[in-house]
Amino acid sequence: MIKKLYLLIALVFVSTSCDELQNVVSTLPQGDGGISDAMIGNGLRQALDFGIDKQVQKLTQKDGFYRNELVKILLPEELQKVDKALRDIGLSSLADEGIKALNRAAEDAVKEATPIFVDAVKGITFNDAKNILLGPDNSATNYLKGRTNTALYNKFSPVIQNSFGKVGADQIWTNIINKYNTIPFVNKVNPDLTDYVTNEALKGVYTMISVEEKQIRTKISSRTTDLLRKVFALQD
């Protein structure tokens, strides 16, 4: 019965406003086992925690960013001309080293900042848990991003800056920029790589959390706790 009701909501969603949908969702029964909003919220938090434990941890390994096409950090537009110019004058290895250095900094920083994400998940509240549960496959991740991105950026940026020095990326990119700026007739560049890598690293973290959320939503075998099985059965 409960699954039929949720299927009905999915069909109604196409032709109703957000306010109308909220009214419908708020009238849903608790269902077998007494699934409360609080339980749904805890299930969504657990899904995000699993995303950090299983997926974000992969980013902290060597090549966690560099060999992962979902999150690999490429050069910003301003530096793409730098990359091309270096390769044109036979410095391809230096250009490759520069890209790798950005990804190494992100890998190191995520390792240092993982507790920040864990605390962020603990601190969020799901005021509209059922709507999030019934939303797209990355709804909980998007909720986390919307509630934490600015605060996490402020905490993550100094970690990235420290990681630049730790993995030698600052020296590598100083060398690259200096080499490029000596090429005749080019417009000199001085990019803010800390800001760029911070944003790209955060984007990568949210991407990997959403990977785990989607698996939990779409694969019953990924629901490895009673709470996950009970909560996400409602959206099947």
Image (tube, rainbow, N blue to C red):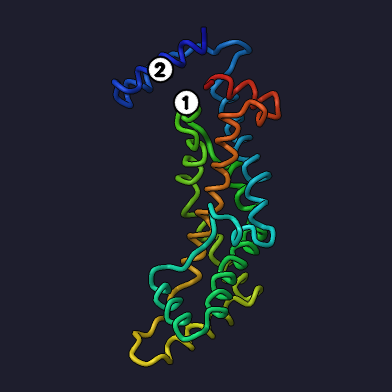
Residue 101 at x, y percent in the picture: 59, 72
Q: Is residue 22 above or below residue 46?
A: above
Q: Disc 1 vs disc 2: Cβ atoms closer than 8 Å?
A: yes
Which residue is pictured at 48% across the width and 36% down the height?
A: 139
* Spot occupied by residue 191 in the image (x, y as percentages of width and height): 43, 76
Q: Which amino acid, by three-letter code, is at mark 2?
A: Ile
Horizontal arrangement in the rendering, residue 8 relative to residue 113 (left or right) = left
Placement of 156 over or under 175, stated as above or below:
above
As helix, strand or loop, the secondary structure at mark 1 comes to loop
Crowdedness near tag 1: few (<14), some (14–19) or many (≥20) residues, C-alpha within 10 Å: some
Q: How many circles with numbers are drawn on the protein?
A: 2
Indicate the secondary structure of the residue bearing disc 2.
helix
* Residue 7 picture quarter: top left
On screen, 1 above or below 107? above
Q: Please name whichever residue, 236 or 25, is drawn nearer the observer in this view of the structure.
A: 236
Q: How many neighbours does mark 2 have within 10 angstroms: few (below 14), some (14-19), or many (20 or more)?
A: some
- Marks 1 and 2, the one that precedes in the sequence: 2
Q: Residue under circle 1? A: 134
Residue type at mark 1: give it. Leu
Marks 1 and 2 sit apart, C-alpha to C-alpha, by 9 Å
**Which residue is label 2 attached to?**
9
**Residue at the (67%, 28%) spot, across then down:** 221
Q: Quadrant of the C terminus?
A: top right
For the point 65% across and 73% down, the residue is: 167
The answer to whether 33 is drawn above or below residue 226 in the figure is above
